[in-house]
Image: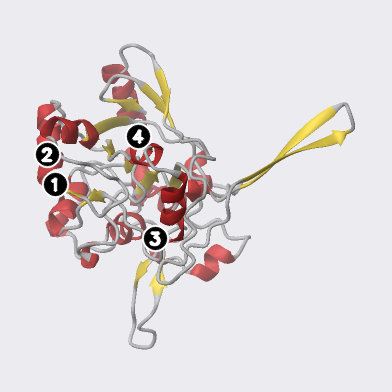
Amino acid sequence: LALQARVGVSLRVAYTYHDFPAVISSHHSITMANLPKFDDLPDKRRYWPAPAGSEEEGLGMLRLLTSEVVADAARTQIQTGERVCLNWDIENLTPPGTFKSPPAGFGRKPFEHRIKWVAEGIALDDEYHFNPQQSSQWDGFRHHNQPAPTPENPERRVFHGGTTAEEIKDTDSPRIGIGFWAKRGIAGRGVLIDYVSYAEKKGIPLNALTRQTISLDEVLEIAAESNITFQHGDIFFLRVGLPGTWAGMSADERQAYSEQSMPQHAGIEQSERVLRFMWDNHFAAVASDAVSFEVFPARQPEFDLHHYLLAGWGGTYWGDV
């Protein structure tokens, strides 16, 4: 990524990789010219133009990161060549969010690292067991679904493109897997909305593990103050301050957070305005140091961004957990 802050950035991608042949249908290509406006979408909850199982479906909005878009980002944004890794320490969230009580029910296994001899005195191996959701990672399209009720099945839910849970659980099915992303990686222009610095300047108390809500008006104010002009294919970064909040917590506070029945996370508001802003700017992906990017539990569940951006539009999410 080339951040508007003029540095290069690398991100770690989590989730299972599948090696499989590409299936491409060029007549379904997304271009800057043929994406409709938000208000012109026939179904604002779903934009699934690509054939089922195709590479284009698997890439989603990453198709906006064309060679021309990436080359322009490199040419206009990279000034110093400094590289910054955005990955969070995989052991940082200890304990992780287990949330064993309903309704959260995440039940994620803690990180485990073993060092063992392969041949006594000659070589050592490392073995890791971890859930990618316990640290910084991309949310793949296989992670989050959306409601898709029918008269016969009012509880029906589907993933991006209409993919079913049965397809995802089929280990022979590569549909909407991150193998499509891994072939070329994710590179483009990143634009940083630094809410942490904004809150400090405005004297706004900030706690990333509350339902503190960042409004679209605040996002636009920060963008204007930072001289940011959004471009199609940008990767939208929102800094909410989870690393600072976590670092300031005691061991008892971290344990209490881990064990609560319903966690609270700061993030951007849910609203039709935010959806229109996200769609009409045609971001290739969104990213944040917050747990869920959007405020959680949702204040307006009908505009749940995970339902729209991931399952509905094929946008990609980067977050700390």
Q: Residue 170: which quarter of the image?
A: bottom right
- Residue at 49 percent across and 36 percent down: it is 12
Q: Measured along the vertical axis of the image, is residue 144 above or below residue 252?
A: below
Is there CB contact under 8 Å for labels 2 and 1?
Answer: yes
In-image side of 245 versus 174 (left or right): left
- Of the image marks 3 and 1, the number of the one nearer the N terminus: 3
* Mark 4, residue position: 66
Distance CA(mark 2)–CA(mark 1): 6 Å
* Mark 2, residue position: 220
Visible in this render: residue 23? Answer: no
Q: Secondary structure at mark 3?
A: helix
Distance CA(mark 4)–CA(mark 2): 26 Å
- Residue at 50 percent across and 68 percent down: it is 165
The kind of residue on which mark 2 rests is Leu
Camera-near label (1 vs 4) is: 1
The percent coordinates of residue 120 (x first, y second) are 90, 32
The kind of residue on which mark 3 rests is His
Which residue occupies the foreground of this view, 153 or 289? 289
Is there CB contact under 8 Å for labels 4 and 2?
Answer: no
- Residue at 34 percent across and 11 percent down: it is 80
In-image side of 82 versus 175 (left or right): left
- Of the image marks 2 and 3, the number of the one nearer the N terminus: 3
Q: Secondary structure at mark 1?
A: helix
Distance CA(mark 4)–CA(mark 3): 21 Å
